Image (tube, rainbow, N blue to C red):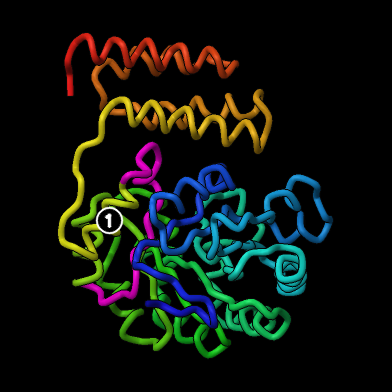
Amino acid sequence: MIKIGNIEIKNKVIIAPMAGVSNIAFRTIMKEFGAGLIYAEMVSDKALGFRNKKTMKMIKVVEAEKPLTMQVFGGDIESIVEGAMIIDKESDCDIIDINLGCPVSKVTKSDAGAKLLLEPLKIYEIVKKVVESVEKPVTVKMRTGWDSNTIYAVEIAQLCEKAGAKAIAIHGRTRSQMYSGVANWSLIKDVKDAVKIPVFGNGDVKTPEDAKRMLDETGCDAVMIGRALLGNPWLVKQTVDYLETGTYQKDFTFEEKVVHIIDHMERLIELKGEKIALLEMRSHAAWYVKGMPGATYVKREIANVSKKEDLKRILYEYLEYLNKNKTT
């Protein structure tokens, strides 16, 4: 069992924060499939400081998804400390994470996310001041560096540990790689070897076998899975089962997939209302059916859906088509 401060993590499968995805609807699904720890999508320190209505809703947590990590991003020391303090007092999350890895220009232009990797001493000050200002355990999520010429992962990890961070999640890519190329797991191992606090490996874990290989090759304490879960929550249970027993269920029926798409939709509607939920479900439903027979046609149909009954109709008609063609 992994401990982050006084928070116990019951298995080695951790869900990465994904902007626009990791809301309560998605997170509760991940928990029901057995995730040990879930990260919420990042929130802006500035928006927290302004008490932006949408952002304040984003830090809401429900008991069914715990333990949960809330992640804050920002580039100004005082502002990110203020944001962390607001989360500490007003969110029922268990852990506060500092984003040191977001590669998107909108974030890095404000000296936040992965841009901070160019300033290890500033990172130390941020982590130290956040740790001193909040009661919840503090962690960081980072990349290996800004680019291939600025790989400061080990130095930054050691500084974060010295500053009081209770765990480190590291994505084995630089900011310049974005999500292309191959994650460098050897740097994850270097970080793990350099610190005593738990280290979570992230990047290119797409199967249960990948998860075990990452644990074996890097010695990391847990694996963090992100994009591979889009439309595939079964991967959580498969990975937990494989790491604990060496086996897992490989096939799921079309009926199960349709049931889960509808369940995801209903949760999103409860969270955001039908109009916004259906817009978001266009992407989610397309991820769920990806690779299935006739998926190209059904994805075109889903792309225009705006009412839940229409999405249900499309899915049930698709299920009827699949069963009629006896494709498994």
User: Residue 137: horizontal and vertical position, in percent?
Assistant: 59, 78
Give me the residue at 23% from left, 64% from top: 243
Asked which secondary structure carries label 1, the reply is helix
Give me the residue at 52% from left, 72% from top: 140
Q: Which stretch is magenta?
A: 217-234
The number of discs equals: 1
Q: Is residue 98 magenta?
A: no
Horizontally, residue 312 falls left or right of residue 210, namely right
Horizontally, residue 9 falls left or right of residue 245, namely right
**Disc 1 target residue:** 239
Quadrant housing the C terminus: top left
Horizontally, residue 316 falls left or right of residue 62, namely left
User: Residue 81: horizontal and vertical position, in percent?
Assistant: 73, 73
Compared with 126, 274 (above or below) is: above
Amino acid at the residue labelled 1: Thr
User: Residue 23: horizontal and vertical position, in percent?
Assistant: 58, 46
- Judged from this view, the residue extending furthest toward the right is 50
Neighbourhood count class around disc 1 (C-alpha, 10 Å): few under 14, some 14–19, many 20 upward: many
Give me the residue at 20% from left, 46% from top: 249
Q: Nearer the viewer, residue 219 or 63?
A: 63
Q: Nearer the viewer, residue 31 or 150?
A: 31
Horizontally, residue 71 falls left or right of residue 76, namely left
Quadrant housing the N terminus: bottom left
Where is residue 269, by image quadrant?
top right
